[in-house]
Amino acid sequence: MRGFGIARDYIKAVEWYRRAADQGNALGQHGLGLCYKNGQGVRRDMLQAYGWFQLASDQGDEEAKEKAAALVALISPSELETAQRLYRELKDRNPAKQ
């Protein structure tokens, strides 16, 4: 049966994940990576997904580490280079949560 619970609002989810991610929260970074990977609330972007998963991975999120590694197999070498550059830019802008 449908109609129970609340409707999914991926655009709002992205907003909240981004707020958390921008404060260095690994769960927010992981969640934002999932949104980009699946195209939920944002345009699907594997390079952005890789960057956010890598940030979460830096903080010990093993699942994000696995997801980032899986994305490497799906993108070309030139895209990987771009994704790694994007990751470095995100890292410079997003402090790790202490």
Image (spheres, rainbow, N blue to C red):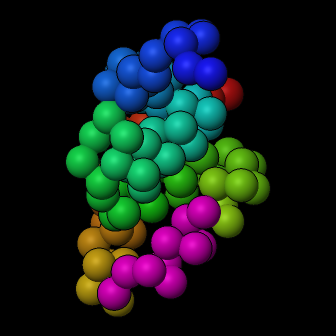
Image quadrant where residue 78 sits: bottom left
Asked if residue 77 is positioned above or below residue 83 in the image, the reply reads below
Residue drawn at 29 percent across, 78 percent down:
79
The quarter in which the N terminus is drawn is top right
- State the image coordinates of residue 56 (x, y, percent, origin top left): 60, 46
Closer to the camera, 95 or 79?
79
Q: Is residue 66 magenta?
A: no
Asked if residue 14 is positioned above or below residue 75 in the image, the reply reads above
Residue drawn at 59 percent across, 10 percent down:
5
Asked if residue 15 is positioned above or below residue 85 in the image, the reply reads above
Q: Is residue 62 visible?
A: yes
- State the image coordinates of residue 39 (x, y, percent, origin top left): 34, 48
Q: Is residue 69 magenta?
A: yes
Q: Residue furthest front?
A: 1
Q: How many marks?
A: 0
Q: Residue furthest bottom?
A: 77
Image quadrant where residue 25 sits: top right
Image position of 67 (left or right of 10): right
Closer to the camera, 51 or 94?
51
Magenta part, dominant SS: helix
The quarter in which the C terminus is drawn is top right
Residue drawn at 54 percent across, 57 percent down:
54
Image position of 45 (left or right of 95): left
- State the image coordinates of residue 42 (x, y, percent, origin top left): 28, 40
Magenta-tinted stretch: 67-76
Q: Is residue 87 visible?
A: no
Image quadrant where residue 40 sits: top left
- State the image coordinates of residue 92 (x, y, percent, origin top left): 38, 45
